[in-house]
Image (tube, grey):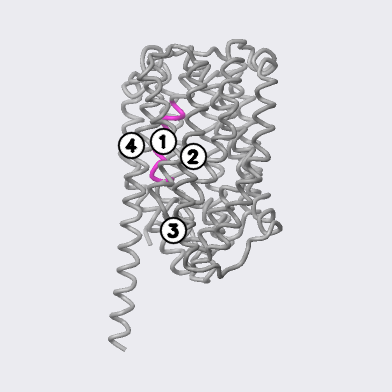
């Protein structure tokens, strides 16, 4: 009996040690990713100026939204199925879900990119009332395909627990290539910057495919035992998640979209930079999610509910501890942080404070979205975002005409907080525990 107890303790210790080690690796990678994104914004802001950067970031928000739409929610479906199949070495399931997902994403993203290219003049003149953004949209349109594919590849790498390559493909490499192009060739045009971004996404796709296929090919040498993931299973999972992604992108980008029709390019740049900087608060959330989400899927599949609860609460404590210093800096020294991006950006200091608070609520609630997705409760998460998404739109249309970029920041922060708090309620109802109960 004593021997069995000792062995159990050793197993739990080894499991926790592995989790902490993987989380630290993911954390370091996310720090590098956050630094790369921060410096990319810094270089863009300094070389293009507030107005040029505003046009670039406006086009980038359009491309990011359309790329998320083109992914059909498959990025989260891949993490769920690959994460569940990987512990059992089910390489047949892993390959089938990836190839089918990549095909669907390519099939959907290509016509969307073509539509953006041909309708860029209409968007620039009729929607944003900024004719200068038309060419920027055209140059960045191919990036819809590249960004959609590299996200799918990154999520597949996450599912097979290749944390470092996953983060590199998702955020680091694109920003490094973009910065390299801007620094090597002094560019003062938002159009050329947009073209460099598009090229960077396709280079990243090539690198990502090499990293993923080398892993899948090596794993498949062990045998082909397993089960093919069918189209019906894929669509059953991804369709609710597609709505989730659309609503989440609505929350993230609607402020910039709607502000684009009401405020000038300089204030759009301030809002965009403040939003990208505020995301640093929750980068630890992303870092932890990369590690825990495949484990959530595997634990739920094996009905290990106590382990699932412990892992979620422990990860929430870690995230709050790491993010507190970052949000503190943004709230206490916002003008200094914003001034780093160049002249004309320090006026958005209050925007950074508002958005940082919203992101901190996101961190405090823990990995609630991934808990619901990885446990097969996609519809509950969909219903959550069907509330928070329209809330974001409604507040944007109400507040932006009155308060400009400040209204956009308030609307975004409220929508982010409401989405995560509702998801906490769903986790409590469906899985039986509260991620906010960090005193446990």
- The residue depicted at 41 percent of the width and 31 percent of the height is 175
Q: Earlier in the sequence, mark 1 or mark 2?
A: 1
State the SS at label 4.
helix
C-alpha gap between disc 3 and disc 1: 29 Å
C-alpha gap between disc 1 and disc 2: 11 Å
C-alpha gap between disc 4 and disc 1: 24 Å
Q: Earlier in the sequence, mark 4 or mark 2?
A: 2
In this view, the residue in front, 152 or 428, is 152
Mark nearest the camera among 3 and 1 is 1
Mark nearest the camera among 4 and 2 is 2
Residue found at the very far front of the displayed protein: 221
In this view, the residue in front, 404 or 283, is 283
State the SS at label 3.
helix
Q: Quadrant of the N terminus?
A: bottom left
Residue 333 falls in image quadrant: top left
Residue beneath disc 3: 312
Residue beneath disc 4: 326
Residue beneath disc 1: 173
C-alpha gap between disc 3 and disc 4: 22 Å
Taking the image as shown, residue 350 lies to the left or right of residue 95, namely left
In this view, the residue in front, 205 or 328, is 205
Residue beneath disc 2: 206
Q: Earlier in the sequence, mark 4 or mark 1?
A: 1
- Coordinates of residue 215 in the picture (x, y in percent): 45, 55
Q: Earlier in the sequence, mark 3 or mark 1?
A: 1
Q: Earlier in the sequence, mark 2 or mark 3?
A: 2
**Relative to residue 219, is residue 136 depicted above or below?**
above
- The residue depicted at 48 percent of the width and 70 percent of the height is 304
Circles 4, 1 touching at the beta carbon (< 8 Å): no
The overriding secondary structure of the stretch rendered in magenta is helix
In this view, the residue in front, 154 or 39, is 154
Which range of residues does the magenta coloring cover? 274-286
């Amino acid at each position: 009996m004593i021997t069995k107890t000792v062995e159990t303790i050793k197993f739990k210790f080894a499991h926790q040690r592995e989790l902490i080690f993987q989380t630290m690796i993911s954390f370091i990678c996310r720090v590098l990713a956050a630094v790369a994104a921060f410096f990319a914004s810094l270089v863009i802001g300094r070389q293009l100026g507030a107005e040029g950067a505003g046009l670039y970031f406006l086009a980038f928000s359009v491309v990011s939204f359309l790329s998320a739409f083109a992914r059909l929610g498959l990025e989260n479906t891949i993490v769920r199925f690959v994460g569940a199949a990987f512990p059992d070495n089910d390489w047949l399931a892993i390959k089938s879900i990836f190839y089918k997902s990549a095909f669907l994403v390519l099939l959907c993203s290509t016509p969307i990119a073509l539509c953006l290219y041909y309708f860029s003049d209409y968007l620039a003149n009729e929607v944003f009332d900024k004719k200068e953004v038309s060419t920027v949209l055209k140059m960045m349109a191919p990036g819809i395909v590249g960004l959609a594919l590299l996200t799918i590849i990154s999520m597949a790498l996450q599912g097979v627990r290749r944390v470092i390559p996953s983060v590199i493909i998702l955020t680091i490499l694109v920003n490094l290539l973009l910065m390299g192009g801007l620094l090597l060739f002094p560019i003062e045009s938002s159009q050329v910057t947009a073209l460099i971004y598009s090229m960077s996404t396709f280079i990243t796709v090539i690198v990502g495919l090499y990293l993923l296929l080398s892993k899948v090919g090596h794993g498949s040498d062990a045998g082909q035992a397993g089960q093919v993931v069918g189209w019906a299973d894929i669509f059953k999972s991804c369709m609710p998640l597609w709505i989730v992604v659309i609503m989440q992108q609505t929350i993230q980008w609607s402020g910039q979209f709607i502000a684009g029709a009401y405020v000038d390019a300089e204030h759009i740049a301030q809002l965009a930079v403040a939003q990208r900087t505020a995301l640093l608060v929750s980068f630890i959330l992303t870092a932890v999610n990369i590690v825990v989400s495949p484990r959530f899927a595997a634990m739920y599949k094996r009905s290990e509910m106590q382990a699932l609860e412990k892992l979620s609460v422990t990860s929430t404590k870690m995230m709050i501890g790491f993010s507190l210093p970052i949000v503190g800096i943004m709230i206490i020294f916002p003008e200094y942080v914003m001034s780093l991006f160049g002249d004309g950006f320090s006026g958005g200091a209050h925007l950074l404070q508002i958005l940082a608070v919203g992101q901190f609520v996101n961190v405090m609630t823990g990995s609630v979205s991934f808990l619901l997705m990885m446990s097969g409760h996609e519809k509950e998460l969909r219903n959550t975002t069907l509330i928070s998404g329209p809330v974001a739109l409604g507040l944007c249309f109400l507040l932006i005409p009155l308060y400009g970029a400040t209204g956009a920041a308030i609307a975004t922060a409220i929508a982010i907080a409401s989405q995560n708090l509702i998801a906490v309620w769903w986790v409590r109802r469906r899985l039986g525990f509260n991620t906010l109960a960090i005193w446990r």
